[in-house]
Amino acid sequence: MAFELFGFSFGRKKTEEPLTPFPPDQDDGSTIIEAGGLQGVYVDLDGTVRNDIDLIRKYREMALHAEVEIAIDDIVNESITEDGSGKFVDINLDLTRLSSQVRRKITEEFNKVLYLLNFNTEGPDIFRKWYIDGRLYYHIILEDNPKQGAKEYRLIDPLRIKKIKEIREKEKVGNVEIVKKTEEYYLYLPTDKNPIQKSTYLVNYPDSPNSGIKIAPDSINYVQSGMIEARTNRVIGYLHKAIKPLNQLRMVEDATVIYRWSRAPERRIFYIDVGSLPKVKAEQYIRDIMNRYRNKVVYDAATGEIRDDRRHMSMLEDFWLPRREGGRGTQIETLPGGQNLGEMEDVLYFQKALLRSLNIPITRLESNNGFNMGRSSEINRDELKYAKFIKKVRNKFSELITNFLKTQILAKQILSEEEFEEIRQYIRYNWSTDSYFAESKDSEIMLDRMRVLREVSDYSGKFFSDYWIRKNILRQTDEEIEEIDMQIEEEKQLEMEELQQGQEDQMGGAGFTGQMPGQVAGDGSAIPTPSEEPTAAGEETPEPTKFLSNKTINYDASSLL
C-alpha cells in the first residue's frame, strides 16, 4: 500500500487509458481538467463547481419546506427501517461462491463498517443527508498499522470537495487528441466560496493561500445519486425535479393569501359633493374630509396589538371620489368582499405536482385514505411504483457500505482488489422492511405456485418432467435445485437413522430376551413375530408399529422462488 498525494492509496497511480479518441467518462460527476504546465492545474469555478455548490444549497433550502420535508421523511422511513433486532441491514454473500471462512471474515468487516458509521443509530440521518445533497463524501482514516483497517470515518461537507480527473498525457492523431494517461484525485477547498474573481481556480500553486489539497482517491468514499444532468454532466439530486413545482406552489400560495387579504374586507366608496370648487380646492376639501372621518385604529398582525396608526395598506383603504355640482350629493356605498375565497383547486393541483416530482403516491395527500391491509392485488399502481423507487434508491445508497467494505478487505488483505471487483456485483444487502405489501405479495406468489403445482403433479412424468416443473413453475435455479436435492437426501438419511433408533429402543424395552422375532427360543419353540402373537377371541390382529420422525424441518421459503 503506497502513500501519495494526501491520504493513502492501494498502489493505484496514474491510470493507463485505452487507446480511444473519446474523453474519460463523467458519469460520476467528476471534473475533467488538463495539466497546466509549471503554473499548476486550473479548475473552472465559474462553471461546474460553483453550480454544484448552488445546487446543493438549493436542495437544502427546499428540504425546509413543509411538503418537501414530509416527502423526504416518508422516503427515509421507507428506505431505512429497523427490524425487531435493532438492525437496519444485513449482508448476503450467497451469490459470491466464496469459502465459508472468507464469508465469515467479510461479515465481520461488514459489522465493523456499521460500527464505525454508528449505522444502527444514525443510519436514517446518513441516508437523509445523501438523499438531499445527492452525494456523500467520507474521509477514511486508517489505524497506525494499516493492516488493522479503518479507525474512523469522517464526514466531509460536499460544498468543499470535488472529484477531479486530470489528463496527464495526450497524443494527437490527425485532428483528434487521444487521452493516454489520466490521474484521479479529490480536491478539498478551504472555503465553499470562490476566493478570487477569475474564471479559473489555482489548484496546486504552492504560494496561493487559496490553493486546495489533493487527496488520494482511495482515502475518500464518494457516493452520488447516479443522476447526471445531460447538458453540463453535473450530478443532480433526487430533489432536482421538484425545484419548479415547489416554486410554482409557493407563488400560488402567496397569490392566494394576497387575494384573500385584499378581497376579504368590505371597502367603502365615498362620493363627496364638491359643488363648483376648482380642482385644487376640491382635492384639498376631500383630503380634509378623509382625515376627519378615517378610522385610524389598526391591528398589528406581528404583535397582536391594536394601535392608532395613519399608515394603511392601499388594498384595504376606502375610496374617496369627488362629485360635481348637479350630482346626487354626498353618497356612501359598500363594495362586497370576494365570493370565491374558499377555492383551493390551484393550490391542490401544484401540491400534487410536487408530490409527483418527489415520487410520492398522490393518494398519500388525501387524509381520508387509510392504510390498506388487503390483498396485494388491491394495491394501486402508484404504491407499486413507489416500492420499486425505494428499492432503486436503497441499492444506490448501498454503494456507500460496499466502498467502506472494500477498504477494510484490501487493508486486511482478505482479498485482492481484482478478486473484490469480481464479487462486487454479487454482494447483496438485506434491508429491513416493515412493508406489509411486500410480504403479502410474496405469500400470494408462493400460494399461486403451489396451486399450479398441485394441478400439474398428475401429469409429472407423462407430459412434464420434474426438472421442467421445478424450473418453470417453482422458478428454482440450478443452484437451488442442487441445494434442495442435497437437503432432501440429508433429511431422508436422518429419518432412516431415527427409524432404526426407534426400533432398537422398542426392542430394548421390558420383556426383551435378547433374541429377535422368528428365532428359536431355549425350549425349542419359535419366537412369534408381532403379527403372529396370539390374540384373544374376537380381537383383531394389531397393525405393526410405525416409527415416525418427530424432528421439525425448517424450510427457507425464499429458496423456492
Image (cartoon, rainbow, N blue to C red):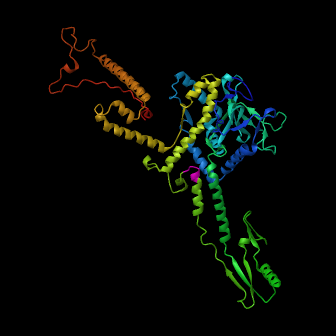
Residue lying furthest left: 537
| Nearest to the observer: residue 150 or residue 4 | 4
Q: Residue 417 appears at what percent x and percent y?
A: 61, 25
Residue lying furthest bottom: 326
For the question of whether residue 320 can be seen, the reply is yes
Q: Residue 346 appears at what percent x and percent y?
A: 59, 62
Residue at 75% across, 76% down: 295
Residue at 75% across, 43% down: 45
Taking 46 as reference, is 373 left or right?
A: left
Is 356 inside the magenta-drawn segment?
yes
Quadrant location, the N terminus: top right
Q: Residue 268 appears at what percent x and percent y?
A: 69, 78
Quadrant location, the C terminus: top left
Q: Residue 214 appears at what percent x and percent y?
A: 75, 33
Is 358 inside the magenta-drawn segment?
yes
> Which range is magenta?
355-360
